[in-house]
Image (spheres, coloured by chain):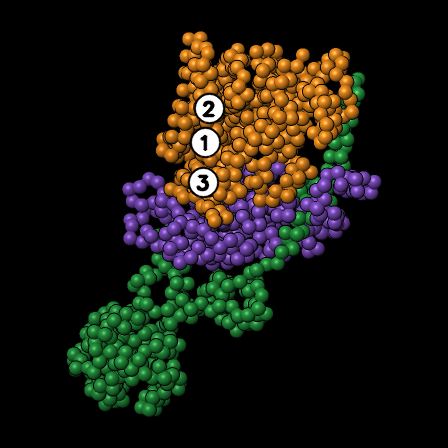
Chain colours: A green, B orange, C purple
Amino acid sequence: MPKHISRILAILAAGLAIALVAKWYFTTGSFYEFGHYRGDSVAEIAAKQPVLQTSGYCKSCHSERHLQWSAANHKSVQCEVCHGAGEGHPQKGKLPIPSDTRKLCSLCHERMPGRPAAQPQIVLAEHGAEQQCIVCHNPHAPKITGVVAKVSGDAAAGAKKHAAACAACHGANAISANDAWPNLAGQHAAYLVRILGAFKSGAQTDVMMSSVAKDLSDPEIQNLAAYYAGLTCNAAAAEKAAGDAAAGKLLAKNCAACHGEAGAAPNPAWPNLAGQKGVYLANALKAFRAGLRKDPMMAGVARGLSDADIVNLAAYYAAQSCGKKP
Amino acid sequence: MEHLIQYAPYTGWVYPNETVIEWSVAIVVYPYITGLVAGAFTVSSLYQVFGFQRLKPVAHLALLTSLCFMLFVPLPLLLHLGHPERAFNNLLTPHLTSAMAMFGYFATFYIVLLVVETWFAFRPYIVEQAQKRIGLIGSFYRALTLGSYDVSETALRYDRKWIFWLAIAGIPGAHGLHGYVGFVFGSLKSREWWSSDLMPLVFLFSAIISGVALLIVLYVASCKLRRTPIDLACLKGLAYTVWAFIIVAFVLEGLEFANIVYKGREGIEMIMTFVTGPLLFPYFVLQFGIGAIVPLLALSYMIWRGTTGKALVVGVTLSACLVLLSVFMMRWNVVIGGQEISKTGKGLLTYPLQVFGKEGLISSLSLVIAPLVVLLGITRLFPPWEHKAAP
Amino acid sequence: MKREAISALRARRGFLRKIGGAGAAVAVGTAGLMHKVAAKSEPAAAQKSFPTPDYDWTKHRWAFGVDATKCIGCLRCVEACKRENNVPLDAHHFNTWIERYVYLEGEDKARIDSQQDPVNIAASGSEGQYRFANRYQDAKVEKAFFVPKLCNQCEHPPCVQVCPVGATYKAKDGVVLIDAEYCIGCRYCVQACPYGARWFNEEKGVTQKCYWCYHRITKGLQPACVEVCPVGARVFGDRDDRDSPISLFIRNNRVQVLKPETGNAPNVFYVGIDKEVL
């Protein structure tokens, strides 16, 4: 064989040998350990730390919130869905409390084709006007139950008790003569039972009503409620009210979900407002705003109302006909 | 300054992650260059192995062309990789189920083969220069002789034998290298436009015609540059070669399209919308019409009429240019076209061609031109024509 | 047996390194690029449990269920996933996504969109936040539903098949993982996946995809998307445990997989999807 051929073959052989050695040398240690990949990479991938910490992590400090949340219907929505990932909290700072709840809550609850019927959904434009959701809903326990009290009273017995104890202020037909005292005719019985019970127990106080209610027995409350609820509301059209009913109507959109668009509450747990006395309504709202009357829902609603808003709202509801059913 | 990524506009329904077209014009250039390598090598082996004597004037040019383009084959891939520095992983741990894994070995083997064959082919010239030249260039030739100045008839007989066997080994090497490129696309079941058993063959035959066409252009250009007469017999031989292979390539490409349409599997509506809309011009007009049918008719006419002289040179060269365009468009329509049809079969995307950037138009075009520049340089060191004149 | 073979291999390699190390390194001249290789670790299999001391990957066979009838399209899973896995906050890279299919009256074909649709991005206000625009609220909708999508962790993954270097592989517990330290970034796997589950991270130069939050499930947690789903549309569990949520899901429902004709044999099982879903 000529010299040049043996030499080129030697060069090729040397190259091949170097390549083979290099292949052995540079092949990563854990390669082929389990298969055609770097065995170490599995542990490397598994070693990454989670970013979402799960609600159990939140519980260790926010146990009270956790308890409320885990007992209610939002327990399927984990803390970090709304508050962001818990990684680095609390060391690195606070987690956000969402401010635009209308945007946040509508991610799940906006009525949208494709969402299963079981999902609670609202038409955004028709619900709660422009209010933030948390005004009415507690985000950790959002369902508004409106505990409906049981009513099983005797209306006739209620009528007697009314004539004896209540008619002086609330009127013979349960249409009050004084603008500061509420009409009772046609009011939801369940609401009346609840509110009288609150006066009786002291959960709610009023100069006059506290002492009156204290003397009422539970059956008497039931009877009264049945009596008032059975009456037809035929209050005279409201006298010229102080406020601007048209402006009140716009504001009343925020109240419509519970109290009905024209003040006829769809749920018997909540009072009808249509045709109610204007001054009484204004006083009640101011009391909610000042925290004198206690109601978790109304406190939130009234917080944002100005004096003018209150007067306008009162004027609007007072001007509504109260005979209508929701 | 263009953005790191450009998102592809789309119509219809595409998967969210599809809005980035991952294989760019660099991946169009890659099979194009590989095809030119395989095609040019085919010409050289037609002479070395199959004894087509009339191709002798271009045999060494073909070898050098093949080598120059082969040196640039890995570049578009390296430019494309997210981690080019890890490219050696491909050689360290080739995953044998991957059509792409063997690329490193195939390419390395083939480059070595080309270098060795070229060395054998030019050894008499190297020895001659080593004895004649002085200085740096002389040392270069002397190093290449590997210390053996033996150009005796016995030694040359050995050389010819080696060239013959290397050429034989090179044929499956070159065609395997390119057939595998077709397999890279044809073996994927994720895209109807790619998933085809004919794909490797389509790539192979289009590669051959592109390589022969390139040699026609290079040969004519080199004769003009060197002011030497064109060997018409050789040119005619090349023209016959390209003519014959165009017919096969054209039939295969047509068959492949007919297969897709006739089978009419899921997503065919979108494919039809695509080929009659955005792909109409690049596919039917450029790839099939201007690029394949026109040169086919032109070459047929010249062969039928026995055209010769200047008309033959002009006609064949123009046809070759059209073939080069057609094959480029074929690569484009496969690589880019395939990605423009969504995997959902319900939407189309548009590839946002970048001009600058490492995978842009300019760098890709440079990759096609660079081998020609290297070829120009290498023909100074190893003149493929003077060698022919040597006794 | 296999262990012995590996250690024999190791010993041989160590020997080769001693005798030829310096020469080979100089000859190849790429030692700098391969620096990480130099530090070879102890065999991981030497531990009792792998890949972590508390988790044995031979004792699990993970699977995923999607109940499309429950999905409300809130996209909390998409947001959680993006944050959990540091996915770029844009409209082009997703480990998981939600598709919406809407059939309008008189139309045979579904109108399909996903959170990355410009209309939906406009509704969310940014590419880093996700919500479905209520674009069909006034249309006459005949049928509509949402379908969550993610990596199917196929039994025969085409992405693993095509990876030239072995940077992606199927772990023993069934999850298809990507070795970001080894991936060369060729994107062949992106092309091979018929589901569009893989995407390329331009910044890191490697491919990424959903890996069922492997770092979570090996610590006994749920994948992030399952964790945050408020309606239980996503189910995850171990098929080796007959009473796991996923075993019950598969046993009690008539499940189907996406694109079964590919032969990939996905491990994400769907309930309540429709012929147009693919």
Whether marks 3 and 2 lie on the same chain: yes
First-in-chain label (3 vs 2): 2
Q: Which residue is mark 3?
A: B353
Q: Amino acid at mark 3?
A: Leu
The numbered dot on residue B50 is none
Report the label total.
Answer: 3
Vertical placement of residue B211 versus C96, above or below: above
Residue C157 makes an appearance in the image: no
Which of the image's four quarters has the C terminus of chain B?
top right
Please state which of the two labelled residues, at mark 3 or mark 2, is closer to the viewer: 2
Q: Residue at x 20, y 87 (%)?
A: A177
Q: Amino acid at mark 2?
A: Cys
- How many C-alpha atoms fall within 10 Å of the one at disc 2: few (<14), some, or many (≥20)? some
The numbered dot on residue B321 is 2
Q: CA distance from mark 3 to mark 1?
A: 14 Å
Please state which of the two labelled residues, at mark 3 or mark 1, is closer to the viewer: 3
Q: Which residue is mark 1?
A: B333
Vertical placement of residue A82 versus C19, above or below: below
Vertical placement of residue C183 versus B172, above or below: below
Residue A302 vs residue C204: left or right?
Answer: left
Q: Residue at x 57, y 14 (%)?
A: B55
Q: Residue at x 61, y 54 (%)?
A: C215
Q: Do the CB atoms of the residues marked 2 and 1 lie less than 8 Å apart?
A: no
Q: CA distance from mark 3 to mark 2?
A: 23 Å
Please state the chain letter of the residue tagged with numbered disc 2 in the rendered image.
B
Q: Secondary structure at mark 1?
A: helix
Q: Secondary structure at mark 3?
A: loop
